[in-house]
Image (tube, rainbow, N blue to C red):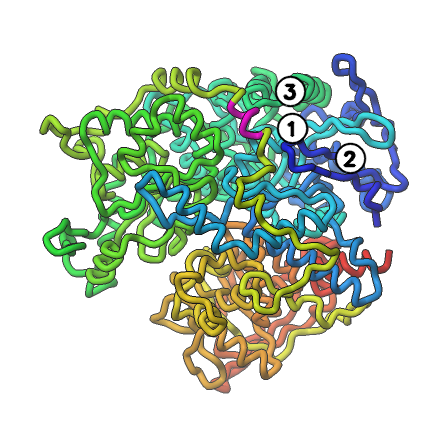
Amino acid sequence: MLSERDAGVCLQDGTGSRPSHAVRQGDSMSDSFNARAVLPVGAARYTYWRLGALDGPFDVGTLPFTHKVLLENLLRHEDGQTVTRRDIEALAAWDPRAEPDREIAFRPARVLMQDFTGVPAVVDLAAMREAMERMGGDPARINPLQPAELVIDHSVQVDAFGTAAAFARNTDLEFQRNHERYTFLRWGQKALANFQAVPPGMGIVHQVNLEYLARTVFGTEGEGERLAYPDTLVGTDSHTTMINGLGVLGWGVGGIEAEAAMLGQPISMLTPQVVGMRLEGELPEGATATDLVLTITQTLRAHGVVGKFVEFFGDGLVHLPLADRATIANMAPEYGATCGIFPIDGETLRFLRLTGRDEDQVALVEAYARAQGLWRETGAPPARYTDLLELDLATIQPSLAGPKRPQDRVPLPDVKANVEAALGEYLQGHDEAGPRDKRVEMEPGGPGLGHGAVVIAAITSCTNTSNPAVMLGAGLLAKRAHERGLSVPPWVKTSLGPGSRVVTDYLDRAGLTPHLEALGFHTVGYGCTTCIGNSGPLPPAVSRAIAEGDLAVCSVLSGNRNFEGRVHPEVRLNYLASPPLVVAFALAGRMDIDLRHEPLGTGSDGKPVHLRDLWPGRQEIQAAIEASVHAEMFRDRYARIFAGDPAWQALEVPKGELYDWDPSSTYIKHPPYFESMGPEPAPVEDILHARCLAVLGDSVTTDHISPAGAIKRDSPAGHYLLEHGIGELEFNSYGARRGNHEVMMRGTFANIRLRNHMAPGTEGGWTRHQPGGEQMTIFDAAMHYQASGVPLVVLAGQEYGTGSSRDWAAKGPRLLGVRAVIARSYERIHRSNLVGMGILPLQFMDGEGAERLGLTGMETYDIRGVAALGGDVEVTATPDSGGEPIRFRARVRIDTPQEQAYYRHGGILHYVLRQLLAA
């Protein structure tokens, strides 16, 4: 194992100084290709690993941008063991048409977390410290060996809205609900080396990363010399890819995998295929970056880029500001790619200067990018790509996506028909929903609420609040609407959740904040809100009307996810849209409207007001950007980024190398992963006499599996909290309680939209306990099986585990007793997370699946041949009815030798802990 000195350090003093990163050097580094060279940048000299050293035998110049970055990573970390000369040669000779079959070891320069995923990561580190001490090791050795940065942005909830006091009220509630969590993070900040937390209320993790934490190219001191190398990272949020817009290679991983990276483990990955997308032309008047990314999402989903890298190139990049590139890169998880990256060019440098990076840093980025062939040249031929796609920006039209998936783009003229079709489908399946034109009074004599009404309109999420063009566009539209006398109907819950404090600064400077607030778009917090389900409760009168009328109501948000049940449990139809269109549909108060022809409302002069009357032109938006967005805003805000507000500064910081667990806490609990762990792993065994916990269909997301959103009183998690003296008003969200495994395992597979085929006619976390067939919650059934020593399996369809990189989508099933999942196909991160928690991912053979094989879940399962950890296993499903056993083969989806090692040890953290113990 590498020492802390070898790994480098990242120390921050909380004064706003930038993080320091040092390249991680091994004890015996090699340089087979004599790649070490000197790069002059002004008066400075940097040592770097020159890709040109491989020219001649290899055509390095035509490699994709991403593979150049990966190749440099291999050159710099060649040690003859984890990285060999043959690894380097194989990547340099990459064949874009070949199926991935070679593993490489990637060492990111840093790890990025948000607090929902970061808290359980720190909980695990604290538990590993105790396990290390119990087994005779030094607990202080458990530290991030790679710089780890955490931004607290996922805990604010929209309780208050529509008033000037909304931000203060939501902040107060945030600290009340999360006092234990925040105190725990302060302990981690003090006790753990190389760990730094950005306090709450500063901004969304990905925007803070884009505007401050990222360097694009690092220039650091190491081994007595200055070193230059690319900024690379992995993050515990799938939208880590937003940083790809800045030319930084990074993507989302599970919290489990990120913890291992922090602890010095390389990330093992198969060399990915790369899809190139040539962008030409320029966006037409009226189209936004949001419309562009929804089109790209639809196109790439249809093409199929799951598990692949995507690179954007072409002369159309000249017309794409960095913020637009970041918008596109952000939604890589939605189009299914591991990353969606842009090259480094003059626009990259302009953004670095705008956001307050110093000139020495900007000069280093340019010099390094040019020297390594990472600089975009106008008119340059495309790199070698697995596939090549083209998109003319001039063809982009205003669009939304919905009502259930981000890839389901709907051109603005077709929105009304889309909503009507969705409502028709809903009405057919809900007899009590009544006629299409049904109206339910919210208050006696008050306005009626009907099907298709917009009850949530949120300008939120990292995707769009990082983009001044769409934010100022929304403000300009609000200004005109306000001046024309329009208002938002009373049933619409409006909110504005800026991605950073700078957004507020430029909206204020442009004079647009009063107009947004006049329509109810007051700032509710600086963090992820509606997009992740932190939308807060609907007004009681609205909730009553929805329940009374069984109404299918809508949300419209400038986010990236609109899966069923995610935004709000009472909202059926969810649409993604640009911030200006969010304002427009809020004014209309309904989604079943054709904004081309129908007015948004009636102005104070008694005349109808149409969207075309309010929509700001491109020149107007650009003028507002130039007048209101300036570098000093970024310098000022980020100079104080680590200080936090008085509430943060007043938190008491626990002391000691070991965390003093509070047994009465319902937020932070000691997890059981390491309780029976010994210094050596047990032999890998077959899985015998297993029962099926759930039979699931296609496109089951991690939102369906992992606990998220509000905790219901009548749920297993709600019962647990009530039993521990927590009132319903203090339940908080699942995300806020991710540090308590007792809550999280009770919320696993409990999404209100989950459909388990073992319990037909139900929605939510229901199953049938076998062999008796009693219907009960999935949690209760799992506990019955666990008490009897019965292992569990889950059957699933295609794209199992799509969505956010939720570690609890693997941790929860493991704690419930799930030993294997058999699916038709997997999302990349979730499959890796299953292995990381010691769950065996198996894949049905092509053309097969649970339905095709006649599997109902009412069988006993034997899985033999597991010990090989590769190839195929034999599965025997013996029906409870006494029929003939169903025998089939399934492919083991443990894809790399490193994953084999993790599985043998029972999980990635167990492997790392034993390695540290033996070192």
Q: Which callout, 1 or 2, points at the residue further toward the start of the chain?
A: 2
Q: Is residue 587 left or right of residue 835?
A: left
Cα–Cα gap, marks 3 and 2: 21 Å
Dominant secondary structure (helix, strand or loop) of the stretch shown in magenta:
helix
Q: How many marks do you count on the picture?
A: 3
Residue at (65% x, 37% y) in the render: 14
Quadrant location of the C terminus?
bottom right
Closer-to-camera residue (240/313): 240
The residue indicated by pointer 3 is 358
Which quadrant of the structure image shows residue 480?
top left
Residue at (18% x, 54% y) in the render: 442
Closer-to-camera residue (188/128): 188
Which quadrant of the structure image shows residue 406?
top left
> In x, y percent, where is residue 81?
85, 46
Q: Nearer the viewer, mark 1 or mark 3?
A: 3
Q: Is residue 374 left or right of residue 105?
A: left
Magenta span includes 647: no
The residue indicated by pointer 1 is 216
The region drawn magenta spans 633-638
> In x, y percent, where is residue 753?
38, 61
> In x, y percent, where is residue 641?
58, 34
Amino acid found under the numbered disc labelled 1: Thr
Q: Which callout, 1 or 3, points at the residue further toward the start of the chain?
A: 1
Q: Check residue 23 in the rendering and tell me which mark sits there, or answer none.
A: 2
